[in-house]
């Protein structure tokens, strides 16, 4: 919908009369432009007929008041043999002269009938005078408001341009500061990683997702080294079981382990012969897919095998993921039961995992 300031004055005025004054039957808005050209707008839109030749003379010489249609340039007929009263009653066209708009002088011819409850009721002289003042006041007000709105919009446009310029400058400054901050943080992390590599004799890689998340890291950097070391110790234990010597840091490793409550084992858990030993590879596999799923999710990607495979370091195919899940189905079922709070993303959002859990559950029910 166009704002009033974007609508031509003639069209805006005719719309107002048509919508606000139901007694207005015919509406002619005549605009005289600065080059003396005359344009006519009606309630039906632009006046398409040939402009009456006497129109220019009429709007110059006629005075504001009430006229019969036969007295206006828009009628060729002349009513003869009428009494003075009949002639006065036929004067139902209000002519308003000289209302200034932004680019033209406006003149209005508006037919009002009927007026009141009875279709045959005519306007009295006092009523006509009151209506004349009201309509002129309304039209002057709406055109003045249009000009005011246009001025405000122009001021807003200028302000927006200034704001855009300032925002662009601030953005350049922030980008520069952000790049410097990113370099400083990356160098700081690399110092920590080098120290941990030397201490534990393991190769530590930084994933792209890990480096990206460092930009938004808002915890204490004083505790970051201690927290990363705890993560490395956990990953190292799992890596040693698998005979590996490389660890890849992902966004998950930025989580503060000191705020994570350890799992409280019940007496049943302590007596359960199930331990991490032969489940270590499956545990590692699930953790790897969970980290990849979290990285994919942070990038706005759906949790499907293809996206998880790409987010893995090194990347793997969807078929490899499906094959690995099927091979580890029984152990995955056991680990999911033992650690209900672990691997929340792939547990609830990765359809392939849900499928193998469902199949394993049915298999166990069948053999029970």
Image: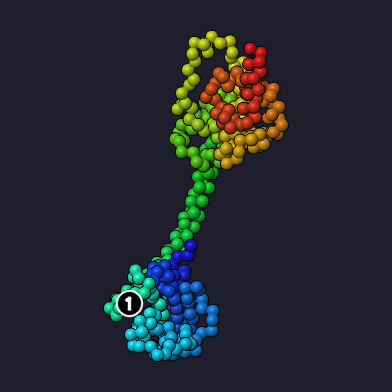
Which residue lies under the disc numbered 1? 123
The spot of residue 110 in percent (x, y) is 40, 77
Drawn side of residue 330 relative to residue 73, left or right: right
Task: Establish if 58 lies above or below 245.
Answer: below
Q: Residue furthest left?
A: 126
Drawn side of residue 295 relative to residue 71, left or right: right
The spot of residue 258 in percent (x, y) is 46, 26
* Figure label count: 1
Residue 73 visible within the image? yes
- Quick one: label 1, few (<14), some, or many (20+) residues within 10 Å? some
Callout 1: SS: loop
Quadrant housing the C terminus: top right
Q: Residue at x 45, y 78 (%)?
A: 28
Q: Residue at x 44, y 35 (%)?
A: 220
The spot of residue 343 in percent (x, y) is 56, 27
Q: Residue at x 63, y 24 (%)?
A: 358
Drawn side of residue 342 relative to residue 310, left or right: left
- On the image, which quarter does residue 120 sit in? bottom left
Pick the residue in front: 192 or 127: 127
Residue 16 visible within the image? no
Q: Residue at x 49, y 32 (%)?
A: 224
Task: Establish if 325 lies above or below 314.
Answer: above
Q: Residue furthest top?
A: 271
The spot of residue 139 in percent (x, y) is 37, 74
- On the image, which quarter does residue 245 sit in? top right
């Amino acid at each position: 919908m166009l704002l009033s300031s974007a609508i031509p004055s003639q069209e805006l005025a005719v719309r107002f009369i048509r919508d606000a004054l139901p007694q207005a039957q015919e509406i002619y808005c005549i605009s005289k432009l600065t080059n003396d050209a005359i344009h006519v707008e009606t309630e039906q839109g632009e006046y398409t007929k040939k402009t009456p030749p006497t129109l220019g003379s009429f709007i110059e010489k006629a005075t504001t008041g009430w006229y019969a249609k036969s007295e206006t340039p828009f009628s060729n007929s002349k009513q003869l043999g009428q009494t003075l009263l009949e002639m006065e009653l036929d004067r139902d066209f209000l002519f308003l002269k000289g209302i200034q708009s932004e680019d033209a002088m406006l003149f209005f011819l508006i037919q009002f009938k009927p007026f009141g409850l009875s279709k045959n009721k005519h306007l009295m002289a006092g009523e006509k005078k009151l209506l004349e003042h009201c309509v002129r006041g309304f039209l002057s007000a709406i055109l003045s408001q249009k000009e005011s709105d246009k001025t405000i919009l122009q001021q807003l446009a200028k302000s927006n341009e200034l704001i855009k310029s300032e925002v662009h400058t601030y953005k350049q400054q922030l980008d520069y500061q952000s790049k410097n901050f990113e370099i400083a943080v990356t160098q700081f992390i690399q110092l920590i990683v080098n120290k941990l590599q030397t201490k534990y004799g393991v190769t530590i890689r930084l994933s792209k997702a890990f480096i990206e998340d460092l930009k938004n890291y808002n915890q204490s950097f004083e505790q970051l080294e201690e927290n990363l070391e705890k993560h490395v110790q956990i990953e190292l234990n799992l890596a040693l079981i698998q005979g590996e010597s490389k660890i890849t840091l992902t966004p998950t490793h930025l989580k503060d382990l000191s705020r994570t409550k350890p799992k409280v084992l019940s007496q049943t858990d302590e007596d359960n012969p199930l331990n991490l030993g032969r489940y270590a590879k499956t545990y590692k596999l699930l953790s790897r897919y969970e980290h990849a799923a979290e990285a994919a999710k942070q990038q706005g990607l759906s949790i499907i095998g293809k996206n998880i495979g790409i987010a893995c370091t090194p990347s793997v195919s969807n078929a490899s993921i499906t094959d690995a899940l099927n091979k580890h189905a029984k152990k995955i079922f056991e680990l999911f039961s033992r650690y209900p709070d672990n691997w929340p993303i792939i547990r609830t959002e990765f359809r392939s995992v849900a499928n193998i859990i469902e199949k394993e559950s049915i298999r166990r029910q069948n053999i029970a």
